[in-house]
Image: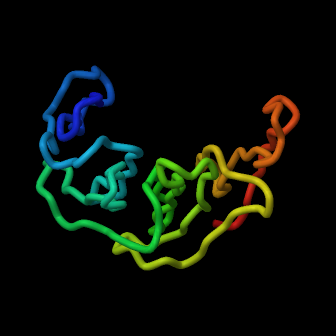
Amino acid sequence: CNDLAGEDEVVALDASTLTVRHKFGRGTFKKNIMGLAVDDASVYAGDNSIFHCIRVFTFTGEPVREVRGNWGRPEQLQHFAGRLYMLEKGSEHDEIDGPVHVLTPEGEVLQLWQPQDWEVGGMHIAGGHLMVYSSDAHESDPAHSLQLLALKGI
């Protein structure tokens, strides 16, 4: 990823050797890529711009579609069991990050999750659990405000 608008690209690497197989997406993103997720056929890349979309590509880099919804900027993406999990980043002027959105690969919202008075800072999926860390939105000392949550049955 680069700091220049439109300069970000997805780099496909060989998992064993880390040799670059191919690159794609340069000039597609209006700001920069925030979050990547993959399923058996697609690559999902969050476009961290005012357009608030997730761009979907084939593994060879062909654009398939854009997923848009009533959310802020995609911050992180995960794919698990046919669902796309997106952590929403608040607007550039909003200090509070948004909820975790559970979406179909086509972008239909299935569920939203955000604990009251806490903002989600990150997420990861492992062993059928959605792990999130969050912090108290009103606590000035981050060392006293972090919590780790495991949500089972995703």
Which residue is found at the position 19% from the left and 26% from the top?
20
| Picture coordinates of residue 95, whole percent (x, y) | 61, 47
Which residue is found at the position 47% from the left and 71% from the top?
103
Above or below, comparing residue 93 to residue 141 in the picture: below
Side of 21 where 74 appears, left or right: right
Residue 89 or 103: which is nearer the viewer?
A: 89
Which residue is found at the position 76% from the left and 54% from the top?
118
Residue 30 or 68: which is nearer the viewer?
A: 30
Which residue is found at the position 76% from the left and 62% from the top?
115
Residue 34 occupies which quadrant of the picture?
top left
Looking at the image, the residue that sits furthest to the front is 93
| Picture coordinates of residue 106, whole percent (x, y) | 34, 74
Residue 111 or 50: which is nearer the viewer?
A: 50
- Give the colour scheme of this rendering: rainbow
Residue 37 or 1: which is nearer the viewer?
A: 1
Disc tally is 0
Residue 10 occupies which quadrant of the picture?
top left
| Picture coordinates of residue 142, whole percent (x, y) | 79, 32
Side of 142 where 10 appears, left or right: left
Side of 16 where 97 appears, left or right: right
| Picture coordinates of residue 7, whole percent (x, y) | 18, 34
Instruction: Check the picture and name the quadrant holding the N terminus.
Output: top left
Instruction: Check the picture and name the quadrant holding the C terminus.
Output: bottom right
Looking at the image, the residue that sits furthest to the right is 144
